Amino acid sequence: MIIFDDEHFMRRALAQAEIAFDAGEVPVGAVAVMNDRIIARASNQVELLKDATAHAEILVITEAARAIGDWRLDNVDIYVTKEPCAMCAGAMVNSRVRRVIYGMPDPRTGACGSAMDITGFKQMLWNVEVKSGVLEHECRCLVQDFFRKVRTSKELSGKKN
């Protein structure tokens, strides 16, 4: 049996982020892994679905629960390219995700230890183990490229914010 490492699965999450990028979504991708096997994958779909909750993490949690037939994801690791926000970190706590592994931190809104620590808040009924910085450079470059493209597009069209 081949054992994959965190970089392997983060590359799969990056592939999902690239799908989001190509669709004009903020390029965040996620995969859910159980027993060294991807059981779900998702990318941001906020614009496509016109749904503020359609973050990659929320979508991958839903797909993972469907794949295993249970809302409890205590044997599931989620790989995501950017540190989850408060909504997504809360969903990980509530669904009892074992680990979240993310690429780039988000010091402004990250809720897995950067701006706040929902995943490690001791009064919660569940804590999610966190690992950060896996393929951080690649994850950061994709996000920066996306927002550079957005700014350039706005400048060319004469739009402001």
Image (spheres, rainbow, N blue to C red):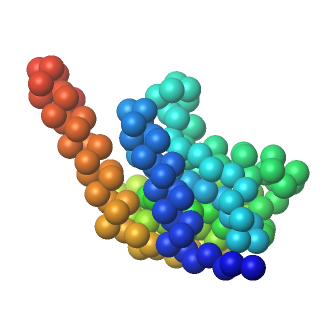
Spot occupied by residue 54 in the image (x, y as percentages of width and height): 57, 37
> From this viewpoint, is residue 16 visible?
yes
The correct choice, above or below, for 23 with respect to 38 in the image is above
Task: Tell whether 119 sits left or right of 149.
Answer: right
Identify the residue at horizontal 25%, vertical 48% (top origin). Answer: 145
* Residue farthest front in this picture: 1
Identify the residue at horizontal 64%, vertical 44% (top origin). Answer: 59
Spot occupied by residue 98 in the image (x, y as percentages of width and height): 70, 71
The correct choice, above or below, for 139 with respect to 55 in the image is below
The correct choice, above or below, for 21 with respect to 4 in the image is above
- Corner quadrant of residue 139: bottom left
**Foreground residue, 2 or 63?**
2
- Name the image quarter holding the N terminus: bottom right
Identify the residue at horizontal 76%, vertical 71% (top origin). Answer: 35
The correct choice, above or below, for 121 with respect to 90 in the image is below
Spot occupied by residue 147 in the image (x, y as percentages of width and height): 26, 43
Q: How many marks?
A: 0
Identify the residue at horizontal 52%, vertical 35% (top origin). Answer: 45
- Name the image quarter holding the C terminus: top left
